[in-house]
């Protein structure tokens, strides 16, 4: 079963992260790299990506003539996807365990983090859509 | 440049979608499949996935002992990711044009849904704020 583990954050959260010291960032990134490598080594890794910052985000809707109407204004409470992992595991419990490890990624000063990780099952891919 | 097009929806929004007739949802999916085929043919397609409904969503936090704490309660306003496309395009405008086509996919009675599609670049392509 495929699951997606999502890190979501508000703009305020992103702003805090941007103020982390270089050392704190390096420690966090090193954890993320080691974590992804472990997932690969254990055979559950499917994909991971980090997304651009929320100030680059746009919402697009189709106009009447099909032209895109873009909007970059969001509610302050809006959660932006910061990054994700897709894993292929036996069941939800295994997905939750892996998510708990990502949640504990080190924060400023190397303190143990507890960021929320949203866990959702992935239903279908390109092949499942008959393509 | 790689972009991800995110289709987000609240629980009530998903409930509305689930109440569509089979004809309406088949027409809708048919249009999305055609867009996927076109993106594939133009070499812009990277990946697409649909996610399970919000009822299955859990937020997980780690504890000191490594045991995951799960929570399935969310604010009503919470936007859930319903599905996404990853595309590789030349310009942001092209990403917006593709997002617009997805936004225009037909809903009940063939009327375009005009649903909002969130367009984001991948981190490796944007400078830090």
Image (spheres, helix red, strand yellow):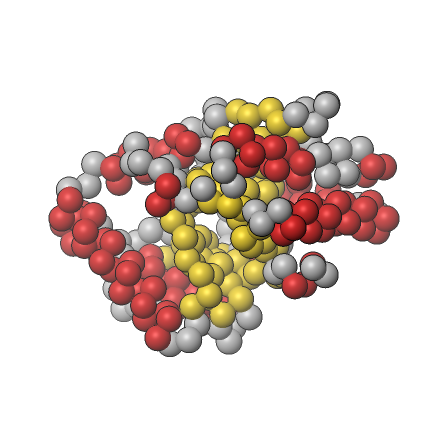
Residue A43 sits in quarter = bottom left
- In depth, the one of B52 and B92 nearer the eye is B92
Q: Is residue A70 above or below residue B85?
A: above
Quarter of the image holding residue A9?
Answer: top left
Q: Is residue B59 visible?
A: no
Give the x, y percent position of residue A127.
Answer: 65, 63
Q: From the viewer's perspective, is residue B74 above or below residue B129?
A: below
Quarter holding the C terminus of chain A is: bottom right
**Residue at 83% from the left image edge and 37% from the top image edge:** B110
Instruction: Report the residue at 25% width, 60% height from top.
Output: A31
Residue A44 is drawn in which quadrant?
bottom left
Quarter of the image where the N terminus of chain A is located: bottom right
Q: Is residue A22 left or right of residue A120?
A: left
Say which residue appears at 80% left-offset and 50% top-offset.
B26
The x, y position of residue A112, in whole percent, is 22, 56
Residue A111 versus residue A124: which sits nearer the camera? A124
Residue B106 point in image, percent of width and height: 77, 38
Left or right placement of residue B52 versus residue A36 in this view: right
């Amino acid at each position: 079963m495929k699951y997606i583990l999502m890190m979501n954050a508000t703009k305020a959260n992103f702003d805090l992260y941007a103020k982390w010291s270089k050392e704190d960032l390096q420690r966090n990134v090193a954890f993320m790299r080691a974590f992804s490598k472990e997932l690969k080594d254990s055979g559950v890794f499917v994909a991971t990506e980090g997304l651009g910052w929320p100030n680059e985000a746009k919402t697009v809707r189709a106009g009447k003539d099909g032209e895109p109407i873009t909007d970059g204004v969001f509610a302050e409470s809006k959660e932006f996807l910061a990054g994700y992992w897709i894993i292929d595991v036996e069941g939800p419990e295994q997905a939750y365990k892996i998510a708990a490890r990502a949640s504990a990624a080190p924060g400023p000063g190397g303190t143990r983090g507890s960021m929320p990780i949203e866990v959702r099952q992935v239903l279908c891919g390109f092949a499942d859509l008959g393509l | 440049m790689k972009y991800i097009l995110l289709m987000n929806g609240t629980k009530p929004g998903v409930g509305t979608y689930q109440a569509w007739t089979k004809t309406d949802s088949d027409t809708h999916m048919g249009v999305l499949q055609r867009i996927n085929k076109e993106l594939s043919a133009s070499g812009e397609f990277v990946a697409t996935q649909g996610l399970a409904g919000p009822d299955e969503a859990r937020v997980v936090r780690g504890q000191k002992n490594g045991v995951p704490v799960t929570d399935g309660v969310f604010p009503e306003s919470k936007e859930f990711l319903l599905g996404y496309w990853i595309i590789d395009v030349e310009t942001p405008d092209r990403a917006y044009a593709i997002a617009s086509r997805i936004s225009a996919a037909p809903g009940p009675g063939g009327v375009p849904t005009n649903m909002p599609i969130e367009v984001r670049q991948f981190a490796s392509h944007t400078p830090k704020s």
